[in-house]
Image (cartoon, grey):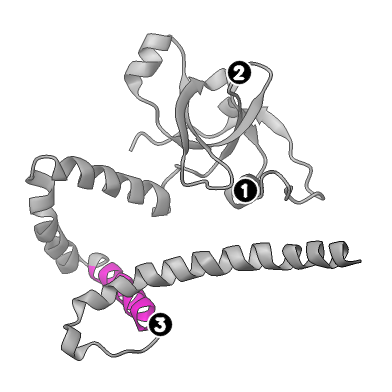
Amino acid sequence: MIRRWFLAGLLVWIPLGGTLLVIRFLLGLLDTSLLLIPPSLRPDIPGLGALLSVALVLGTGALAANFLGSKLLDWIEYPFDHIPLVRSFYGGMKKLAESLFSEKGTSFRKVVLIEWPRAGQWSIGFQAGEPLRQVADIAGEDMITVFVPTTPNPTSGFLMTVPLRSARLLDLSVEEGMRYVISLGVVPPNPDARPSMRPASAAPPLSAE
């Protein structure tokens, strides 16, 4: 009886505690926006940093959405685009953000299955973007860039380029695929929607941008 209660308690606290830790981390990260306020004027109000961060993001987005605001942001970005080393990092991060959050972006929109780490063993990954043209030229065939996340921490993983013909496009949403990875494969996709596999070549081509 005690063992059953203990396991039942773990089933409650493991997901709850993990979620609370993530929320605490995110709130702490958002609270860094309070550094924009002088210490003498900084109010001690819980959650104020998160609200300030959201307002800052919305305000920047509203500014970037109009012509004059976009010109102002171009002027602000100018030094970041011309300082050696800084421009490489900034340019890469900007491209990543555009790929992930742009409505026209195609990166991380598809869940794929590839044979990895060796033949006969399959891993779930996410179509990451357009592969290097040089890689396709060397391989002599169309390739696909795939990010295979580690579990249960999907923020790390392996970036690889595999032949397009060997990848399979899963009929799953990115959320379902990520939930499956984070849960160590314990939480399957919707059982009522049996996932089918089809060649990744049947998917729309990636944008080169």
Q: Left or right? Give the position of 44 relative to 7.
A: left
Q: Identify the mark at residue 173; answer none if there is no mark.
A: 1
Q: Residues within 10 Å of mark 2 (few under 14, many from 20)?
A: few
- For badge 3, the amino acid type reads Gly
Which residue does the image show at 58% across and 22% down from the upper left? 117
Q: Which mark is residue 118?
A: 2
- Mark pair 3, 1: CA separation: 32 Å
Query: Three-letter amino acid code at disc 2?
Result: Arg
Q: Main secondary structure of the magenta part?
A: helix
Rate crowding at label 3 as few (under 14), some (14 to 19) or many (20 or more) other CA atoms within 10 Å. few
Can you identify the residue that label 3 sits on?
47
Q: Earlier in the sequence, mark 2 or mark 1?
A: 2
Marks 2 and 3 sit apart, C-alpha to C-alpha, by: 47 Å
Is tag 2's residue or tag 3's residue first in the polypeptide sequence?
3
Question: In the image, is residue 21 above or below residue 91?
Answer: below
Instruction: Report the label total.
Output: 3
- Determine whether the residue tagged by mark 2 lies in a helix, strand or loop: loop
